[in-house]
Amino acid sequence: MNRIIPAMLAACAMIFAPAALAQTPPNVLIVGQIAEPKSLDPHAVTATNDFRILVNVYDGLVRFADGTLEIEPALAESWDISEDGKTYTFKLREGVTFHDGTPFNAEAVKFNFDRMLDETHPFHNTGPFPLAFFFSTVDEVNALDELTVEFKLNEPFAPFLSNLAYPTGLIVSPAAVEKSGTDFGRNPVGTGAYKFVEWQGNTRVVVEANPDYWDGAPSLEAVVFRPITDANTRVAEMLAGGLDVMVEVPPDSLAQFRTDANFAVQEQAGPHVWYLILNTKEGPFKDKAVRQAANYAIDKQALVENVLQGTAEISAGPVPPAFAWAYNEDVQPYPHDPEKAKALLEEAGYDGEELTFYVTEGGSGMLDPVAMGAAIQADLAKVGMNAKIETYEWNTFLGEVNPGLEGKADMAEMAWMTNDPDTLPFLTLRTDALPENGGFNSGYYSNPEVDTILEQARVSTEPEERATLYQQLQEIVHEDAPWVFVANWKQNAVTSAAVTDFKLQPSFFLMLHKVSKN
C-alpha cells in the first residue's frame, strides 16, 4: 500500500466523528455515494452508483469524450471497421500495464470478452454478467498480435463502439481474475487513473492515484467513496464539511447549496428515464386500458414541480430527449386526466383489486423515490386504484425487481441512465429480454412489432433510418403503456469550494482523473 494511504485513512477517521467536527483530509477527495456498491467487477454490475467508482479504476478500449457521448480512443489508439460493418480491428496503446504490474495487450482484451461471452471459458463462472448481451453480436475475438485485437460480429451492430465505452466494456486484469476468482469484485485491478486500496463494507471504498497512468497521473492522492443511503444524512455531512462531493442532491436542498459560497452546484440534462414498471403478465396491468389509466391518473406535472422541484421534465416514453436525433417530438406525455383514467378502468372492469407497489429507499437516478412513491400512491387512490407500498434498500430492491415481478408485485419504480437510444428498450422491452433470458424486462412486455424494430435499428448503419425506427418505437410503446412514463432527470452534484475541475458528464459517470482539491 502506498505510504500516504495509512495516514490518509487515519485522517478519514475524523469523518466518522460527530458531523460538527467532520473535516476531509488534504488532497483526498471524499465522495458521498447513494448506496453501497454491489461489486467492483465492471462486468458484473448494472448500477450507475457502481459505475461512478469503476470508471476511475478501469479503462475501456474507447471512452466517451469529455462532456459528450461521442467516442474517442482510450486503451485503443485507433480502429478500423470493415465495409460490411462486421469486423472491428483495434490497435492498442503500447506500454500500458494493469495495477498488478501485468501487461495490457491483445490477449488481455480477448480474455475479457471471452470470459463474458463464452460459457466454456474457465473463468466464466466468475459472473454472472448481466449486461454481456451488449456484445451479443460478437462471434469471436482474436489477438492478431501483441497490440492488435479483432472483433468479428455476426451482423452489423450500430451501438458497438458506444457499448464498448460503457462500463461493461472496461478491461480487467486477467491475472487478477485468475488469482481472485469469484472474489474479484472485492479485489479489482484495472489500468485506470486510480488503484484500488480497500473496501470496508457499508463504510468506504478507497482508491489511490496511479502515478504511471498512461493519460497522466491524477493530482489527487486518493478518493474515498462513502455510501450514505439516507439523503438527509448526506446533506448534513456535506454541510458539515465531511464530504467534498455529493451526488444526487435532494431537490429541496439545492437552493440551500446554491446560496452558500462554500459550495458549487452543477446540473446537466442527460439520457435518463424514471418510470414505473407494470406487470403486464398477470393482474390488472395485463389489460392495456388499465395501464393507460395509470398513466392518466398520475399527475406528473405535480411530481416534477413539487416533489422534484424542477429538477426533471415529464417523460413521454422510453427514449429520452437527450438523444435529440432519435427523439420523437410528436409523442406527447400522457396528460393528467383522472376522469379519463376512471373511464378506462370501468371499461376494463377493474374492481379495485389491491396493487403491490415496490419502492426503493434510494438508488442510481431514483429521484426521491420514497416521496415519489407516496405521491403516486395518492394519485392512483383518487381514481380507485389502491396501491400497497413495499419499500426496500437499493440492492435488495434490485434483487426483487430484476428477476421479474411475477408472483410478487404489480408495479415497481425504476430508473436508467443510457448511452444509446437502443440500450434501454433493447434491455427492457424486447420479448427476448425477459428475466429468464438474462434481460431486464421485469414487466414481461411483449410486442413482436417492437422486437422487429429494435432488431432492425441495431443492424442499420444509416443514422436517418435508425432515427425513424426509434421514433416508430416510441409511438407503439407510448400506446401500449407497459410503463408509467414519469420523468427525465437533470442530474446534479454539489462540491465544496475547495474542489476544482469537477464536471458532470452526460454519461452520468464521475470522471475524477483531472479533479483537484485546493
Image (spheres, rainbow, N blue to C red):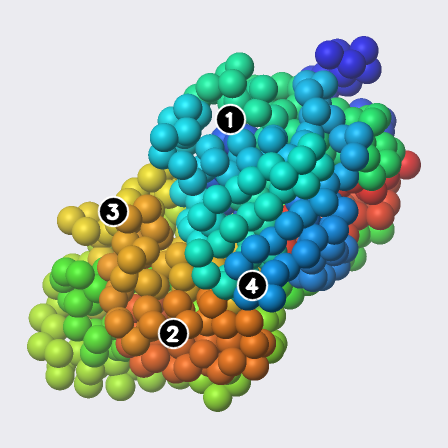
Identify the secondary structure beneath mark 4: loop
Going from N to C along the chain, the mark reached first, 2 or 3, is: 3
Confirm or deny contact between disc 3 and disc 4 (CB under 8 A).
no
* Residue holding disc 4: 85
Residue 89: % across, % down: 64, 50
The circle drawn on residue 436 is 3
* Residue holding disc 1: 185
Q: Identify the residue shown where x is 72% and y is 18%.
A: 101
Q: Identify the residue shown where x is 28% and y is 48%.
A: 437
Going from N to C along the chain, the mark reached first, 3 or 4, is: 4
Relative horizontal placement of residue 144, taking residue 397 as reference (left or right): right
Relative horizontal placement of residue 204, taking residue 390 as reference (left or right): right
Please tell me how many numbered marks the rendered image carries: 4
Give the image quarter of residue 120. Answer: top left
Relative horizontal placement of residue 308, taking residue 413 as reference (left or right): right
Q: CA distance from mark 2 to mark 4?
A: 19 Å
The circle drawn on residue 453 is 2
Confirm or deny contact between disc 1 and disc 3 (CB under 8 A).
no
Residue 22: % across, % down: 73, 27
